[in-house]
Amino acid sequence: MNNHKIQPASKLGSLFESFKLGNLKIKNRIVMAPMTRAFSPRGVPGPDVAGYYRRRAENGVGLIITEGTLINDPAATNNPNIPNFHGEEALKGWANVAKEVHQAGGLIMPQLWHIGTDRKVGAIPNPEELPIGPSGLDLATGEKVNEPMSQERIDAVVAAYAQAAADAKRIGFDGIELHGAHGYLIDQFFWEKTNQRTDSYGGDLVKRTRFAAEIIAACRRAVGPDFPILLRISQWKSSDYEAKLAANPDELAQFLAPLVEAGVDVFHCSTRRFWEPEFAGSELNFAGWVKKLTGKPTITVGSVGLDNEFLSSFRGEHAGTANVDTLIDKLNDREFDLVAVGRALLVDSAWAAKVRDGRIDELKPFTPEALRSLS
């Protein structure tokens, strides 16, 4: 993948085709991936956050998925600057974000998030709150940090997701994404290492989907049949890059079926490198397999627009702009439907416009300095 140039814009036609998602028409296949920015003091997104997202819409991004936004649970976060998606002031801020993006011709969905036991004991802004998870186990160490979530707490969290979904629709968003990846709360129920329950929320991989399925179904009831619900999933976890929920396509099919039945419209399939096959014996990536097994639209993501893996830039090896030959081939083959761009769009608000217009030499490489401001 390294040391190539992006194809001329004339060969990128499929990346700029429109896509119909229910009643939504997405003007191209480019999605802004959710990326935590933590520039919302006291959890309230201000005009700078609205401007940040608006600039991506102005420059041709088809669909924006916001950074993770917190549902109404006191243990949802470990950072007071991560935006809430509850409370009058925060929701007013998000309504303004949606308005700005729509005025610029874009579409936008909030990613709804709870970090579960990725939160450390004593973390602010609610230091008195213990982390919560299916079995109360620390994500990285496996040590017990709390009792397993009670049925009452599970029901409250499900209700909080549903309320956030209803609020997203009410204040003008175009859909929602549920963060069920990377070892956060929903994914902690999926993963055997963090879910050792023996009740109806634990057991085999299918049984471990119950919590997510209840959230999806509750959100569907809250928003009705025509409001898109996206679910972000991953095999890898932030504490274990080699983790696998499903070891083969049969297991993946079993895992996905209850989530489809619950009401997922699109699966956002997170990998660290989109070009890598998910299972031996097939060139399909994770998004390709999920689409094949469910028939649902999928979003691929993982180092799109970059040469190197995520951590390389932090080792002083600045990630350059990558070729997208493989990406376009897979998109042309309808292996997946949409392409999420993360760091390349974080550092360069005009990434989509530059690629569309063939201004490849103007693309900005990602560096860690980009994380220090909302450009």
Image (cartoon, grey):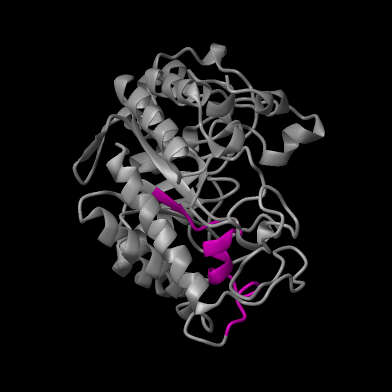
Q: Is residue 280 visible?
A: no
196 part of magenta stretch: yes
Where residue 269 sits in the image (x, y, percent)?
47, 52
Q: Is residue 263 visible?
A: yes
Where residue 205 sits in the image (x, y, percent)?
50, 77
319 part of magenta stretch: no
Tell me the residue at 71%/28% (across/down): 368
- In depth, the one of 165 and 244 nearer the eye is 165
**Rendering quarter of residue 76:** bottom right
Position of 54 relative to 109 (above/below) = above
Is 36 situated left or right of 369 in this image? left
- In depth, the one of 66 and 29 nearer the eye is 66
Tell me the residue at 32%/38% (across/down): 173
The N terminus: image quadrant: top right
Residue farthest along the bottom direction in this orientation: 198
Where residue 371 sits in the image (x, y, percent)?
66, 28
The C terminus: image quadrant: top right
Where residue 146 sits in the image (x, y, percent)?
69, 72
Tell me the residue at 42%/34% (across/down): 94
> Magenta part of the protein: which range?
177-197
**Rendering quarter of residue 56:** top left
